[in-house]
Image: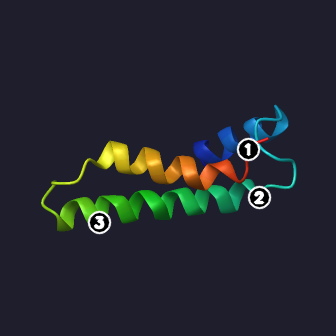
Amino acid sequence: MVRNETDMLLAKKAGVIKADADAHQICMDICTIVKGCVFEWCLTDGKIEIRETLSRILSAYLRRYMK
């Protein structure tokens, strides 16, 4: 198991994320979001604020899984 998925399972055990959340699916989605942001950053020749964009999108995505 990859580290991110292990961390997500620990967050689930600690009650940070909902018990019915699929840790594997969350990690796969996060990977896709990150790749999409990096792709967009490349297409704009680095003109987007990638950290701000990632933070905004990941925060919105993860909200549905937080307790």
* Residue 61: image location, x then y, percent: 59, 55
First in sequence: mark 3 or mark 1? 3
Extreme residue in the left direction: 45
Determine whether the residue tagged by mark 2 lies in a helix, strand or loop.
loop
Residue hosting label 3: 39
Q: Amino acid at mark 2?
A: Asp
Measure the C-alpha gap from mark 2 to mark 1: 12 Å
Residue 7 visible within the image: yes
Specify few, some or many for label 3: CA neighbours under 10 Å numbering under 14, 14-19, or 20 or more.
few
Q: Is residue 4 left or right of residue 24?
A: left
* Residue 22: image location, x then y, percent: 77, 58
Q: Is residue 6 left or right of residue 47?
A: right
Residue 1 visible within the image: no
Quarter location, residue 24: bottom right
Residue hosting label 2: 22
Residue hosting label 1: 66
